[in-house]
C-alpha cells in the first residue's frame, strides 16, 4: 500500500488553517499544522514533510525567514507560499528565497490542490533524475548501486556511490581530499589523518567509469585543489 504524503500547513488564521486541513485530509494527505512561525520552523526543519504550505505573515518568525532557513538545510524540500501580498516585488522575494510556487489569497481551493500536486510531480521527477548519473557512455543507478558502460555491467559499493553523490552535489568545484574524508567517511576535520582511502576509491571508480583511467575525462584531479566530477 502506497504511503500517504505528509503535508505541513503553517498558517495563523484559524478559519483558513482548518479549511486547508480538511481539504488535504480529504485528498489523502497526512496533515500537520503550526499556528505561528517559531513552531512552523521547528516542524519544517524536521525533514519529514513531502510538502510545506507556508503563510508569509505569521506571529514570530515570518514565512520569508522560515523559507530561507529551510533552504539552508534542504534545497529540495517542496514549498508553496501562501500570501495576502500580491505585488511582484514580494512574490519575487519569496521565489528568490527558494519557494517552488506561491498562491495569493483569497485563493481557489481546487487551484491550490492542483498547484500542490504539480509541485510534487516536479519534485518526484527531479528526485528520479538525481538517482541516475550519466557520464559519457556510462549510466549509473545511484540508488541500486549498479550501472552499465555500453553493454558492460557495472557494480558499485555503497561507499563508491557516496563519493560519486558528494562529488555530483558539488560538481561546480573541486572537492579537497580532506572534505571527502570529513563528509563521506565522517572523520573529524581536526584529526591528523594520513590515509590513501580517498585515492584508492577514486582509482577504483576511474577503472569503472573511464575509457582510459590514466587520462580521466569525468573524474579528474585538479592539482592542489582536489577531485572534480565533470558531468556531461
Image: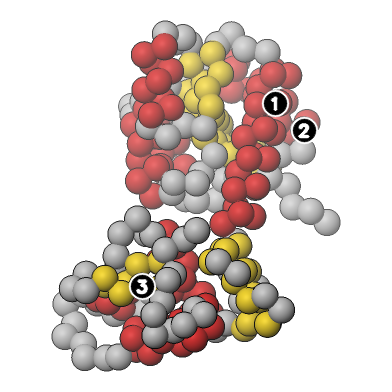
Residue at x 37%, y 32% (from the top left corner): 97
Q: Which residue is mark 2?
A: 27
Q: Looking at the image, tell me whether mark 2 or mark 1 is earlier in sequence order.
A: 2
Where is residue 38 shown, x and y percent of the image?
37, 35
Q: Which residue is mark 3?
A: 220
Q: Which residue is mark 1?
A: 113
Vertical side of 105 occupied by 32: above or below: below
Decide: few, some or many residues near mark 2? Use Cα within 10 Å; few <14, some 14-19, many ≥20. Answer: few
Q: Secondary structure at mark 3?
A: strand
User: What is the distance, in whole Å, between disc 2 and disc 1 at their CAs?
Assistant: 9 Å
Q: Quadrant of the N terminus?
A: bottom right
User: What is the distance, in whole Å, between disc 3 and disc 2 at their CAs?
Assistant: 48 Å
Vertical side of 65 occupied by 169: above or below: below
User: What is the distance, in whole Å, between disc 1 and disc 3 at their CAs?
Assistant: 45 Å
Residue 49 in which image quadrant: top right
Q: Secondary structure at mark 1?
A: helix
Amino acid at each position: 500500500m502506497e504511503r500517504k504524503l505528509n503535508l505541513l500547513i503553517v498558517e495563523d488564521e484559524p478559519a483558513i488553517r482548518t479549511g486547508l486541513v480538511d481539504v488535504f485530509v480529504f485528498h489523502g494527505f497526512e496533515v500537520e499544522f503550526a499556528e505561528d512561525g517559531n513552531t512552523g520552523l521547528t516542524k519544517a526543519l524536521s525533514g519529514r514533510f513531502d510538502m510545506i504550505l507556508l503563510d508569509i505573515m505569521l506571529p514570530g518568525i515570518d514565512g520569508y525567514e522560515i523559507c530561507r532557513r529551510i533552504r539552508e538545510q534542504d534545497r529540495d524540500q517542496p514549498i508553496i507560499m501562501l500570501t495576502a501580498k500580491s505585488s511582484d516585488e514580494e512574490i519575487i522575494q519569496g521565489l528568490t528565497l527558494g519557494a517552488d510556487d506561491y498562491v495569493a489569497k483569497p485563493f481557489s481551493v481546487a487551484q491550490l490542490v492542483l498547484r500542490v500536486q504539480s509541485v510534487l510531480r516536479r519534485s518526484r521527477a527531479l528526485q528520479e533524475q538525481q538517482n541516475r548519473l550519466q557520464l559519457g557512455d556510462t549510466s549509473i543507478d545511484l540508488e541500486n548501486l549498479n550501472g552499465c558502460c555500453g553493454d558492460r555491467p557495472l557494480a558499485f559499493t555503497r561507499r563508491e556511490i557516496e563519493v560519486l553523490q558528494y562529488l555530483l552535489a558539488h560538481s561546480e568545484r573541486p572537492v579537497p581530499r580532506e572534505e571527502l574524508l570529513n563528509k563521506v567517511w565522517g572523520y573529524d576535520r581536526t584529526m591528523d589523518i594520513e590515509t590513501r582511502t580517498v585515492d584508492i576509491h577514486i582509482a577504483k571508480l576511474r577503472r569503472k567509469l573511464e575509457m582510459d583511467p590514466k587520462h580521466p575525462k569525468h573524474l579528474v584531479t585538479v592539482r592542489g585543489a582536489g577531485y572534480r566530477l565533470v558531468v556531461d
